[in-house]
Amino acid sequence: MRVEIVTEKTDPGFLLKLDGEVDMNTSPDVRNAFAAVFKQGIEKGKALFVDLSHVRYMDSSGIATLVEAMQACMKQGTRLRLVDLSPPVRDVFELARLASVFEIFSTMREALTGL
Amino acid sequence: MRVEIVTEKTDPGFLLKLDGEVDMNTSPDVRNAFAAVFKQGIEKGKALFVDLSHVRYMDSSGIATLVEAMQACMKQGTRLRLVDLSPPVRDVFELARLASVFEIFSTMREALTGL
Amino acid sequence: MNDRRQMREGRREATEVKDPGGETVTLTVPSHPKYLYVVRSALYPIARSAGFSKQDTRKIVLAVDEACSNVIKHAYEGDHAKTIALTVTVNGGGIQIRIKDSGKKVDAAKIAPRRLEDIRPGGLGTHFMFTIFDTVEFDTSGERGTILTLVKKKKQ
Amino acid sequence: MNDRRQMREGRREATEVKDPGGETVTLTVPSHPKYLYVVRSALYPIARSAGFSKQDTRKIVLAVDEACSNVIKHAYEGDHAKTIALTVTVNGGGIQIRIKDSGKKVDAAKIAPRRLEDIRPGGLGTHFMFTIFDTVEFDTSGERGTILTLVKKKKQ
Ligand SMILES: Nc1ncnc2c1ncn2[C@@H]1O[C@H](COP(=O)(O)OP(=O)(O)O)[C@@H](O)[C@H]1O
Ligand SMILES: Nc1ncnc2c1ncn2[C@@H]1O[C@H](COP(=O)(O)OP(=O)(O)O)[C@@H](O)[C@H]1O
């Protein structure tokens, strides 16, 4: 019923790990976590990674939050990279046909290549 | 919403592994699994082990099923040994103050001693 | 037998909880044991978000499951085509669950939590209810069936 | 736009599902987003035991969550003190979910699933509903509010 968000500042940029359910009730928390990262600013050449492996549920409000984050990244000239989508996240991405809109990687290792 | 039951015939006796929720709806399945073991019969000096580590829920109908199994073991001159109780099972045992009625072990290794 | 007294003297408390304010969820399910899982699944997050710990929530869910099982077994005598209506109300003080059936009325004399030393299958359900909840009140004043009110206060 | 047609021609199908027989669960929750989790928790086991796969069940739950979110956002315009009433009926043929609110009536003209190429936040909820369910019917003929009927048949 809740989402836990851990933000790490690492060498290749920022890593947000989401754990729990992202719905209309909890997506404001995710939005706030993104806002905190953008406030600090992401250096050129670095990226924003979002680990979605522990997301047990995501609805359109979660998708909207990710789309907004991608747009904010574009404005800052950095990239949003989604890592290790859980089955429920994959379902909702497929339904929304968003797989081609985002940069999606199976592992963090792969997400680090070609930045 | 279901319970999965795996019965293994091993050297020290029979091992029943329960996985899922044991309630009024599913305890008849557990009762049937016990009945199948008793029909085969447990040799003298061997025991019936029940692995409860993957039981996510148990109510009084599950307790009743275990009490019946213990009584059937006593009749056959063998022993019922409960192994690795999950937190929900521990809760219901504590509420029923049954901890002293059953032979309870943390691990299969310990459950095998002193037979 | 403190438990029994609580039931008998439940009236005063019952008026207190008649309109508990707060937020209410209602859930009506068929009187088939397969819907016990639905009841548990809905109740768990309500009790959690009411502020009860995981362990207390598990116990609340257990006692309500037992009460619904009793409705199926005793009030409806195994008839799976009836309904069980739950009303769950949460406020700052705790949680109240009302369970309404239209079956055979409870015989209060039978709701005597049995002595635990008496090891036999059965008879545990009501013991759990009285142990876990602060108020356990059976109301058979309606035309048919029973309304069971269970209240658990939050520890301060 | 096959989806739209389905909605417009929903009437014939709707009479088919008026009395779907089978077993019914009703669930009424406050119009606060924290109760979406309760709705999902209750619906998941019902859809699973109706015989839908885990993936289909996840999708059914998603679409109902979206419909309830829309009631909170659009019908109640963020008022969390109203109620959302769900009626879930399961029979051999599939599952029907009715979602009733007493808020602002749906404007059917606005329920146009947007083109997916149009990448922006929002507008996805109704798309999910039309993609996942066989019947999506909005009934605003009552005095207030909307009754949304969602039906998904089981694959044979
Ligand atoms: N909802 C009910 N309607 C009628 N009788 C009930 C109800 N709940 C409990 N009882 C009576 O109380 C007794 C004790 O119930 P319980 O402790 O749950 O154990 P069990 O159901 O295993 O007998 C039951 O055997 C029954 O006679
Ligand atoms: N229950 C409802 N009541 C009123 N209007 C609704 C309802 N559901 C949807 N709508 C209308 O349909 C539009 C599309 O809904 P949806 O696809 O869920 O996207 P979003 O809610 O993000 O805008 C909404 O913006 C709203 O105008």
Image (cartoon, coloured by chain):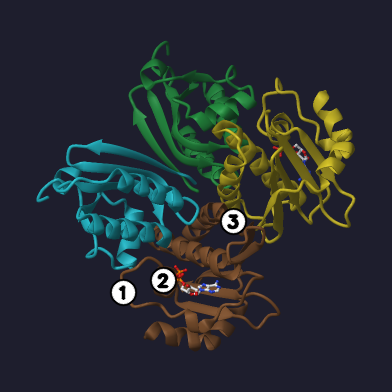
Chain colours: A cyan, B green, C yellow, D brown
Q: Chain of mark 2?
A: D
- Left or right of A77 in this view: C144: right
Can you see residue A58?
yes
Q: Which residue is mark 2?
A: D123
Element type at mark 3 = loop
- Left or right of D126 in this view: A112: left
Element type at mark 1 = loop
Q: CA distance from mark 2 to mark 3?
A: 20 Å
Asked if the residue at tag 1 contacts the one at tag 2, i.e. Cβ–Cβ closer than 8 Å, the answer is: yes
Q: Position of residue C7 (x, y in %)?
A: 84, 34
Residue nearest the viewer, comparing C75 with C4: C4
Q: Which residue is mark 3?
A: D32
Residue D4, above or below C44: below
Q: Which residue is mark 1?
A: D118
Q: CA distance from mark 1 to mark 3?
A: 29 Å
* Disc 3 residue: CB within 8 Å of ligand 2: no
Q: Position of residue B12 (x, y in %)?
A: 36, 21
Identify which amino acid the numbered label 2 is placed on.
Gly
* Disc 2 residue: CB within 8 Å of ligand 2: yes
Q: Chain of mark 1?
A: D
Q: Position of residue A15 (x, y in %)?
A: 27, 42
Identify which amino acid the numbered label 3 is placed on.
His
Q: Are marks 2 and 1 on the same chain?
A: yes
Residue at the image position 55 percent from the left and 81 percent from the top: D107
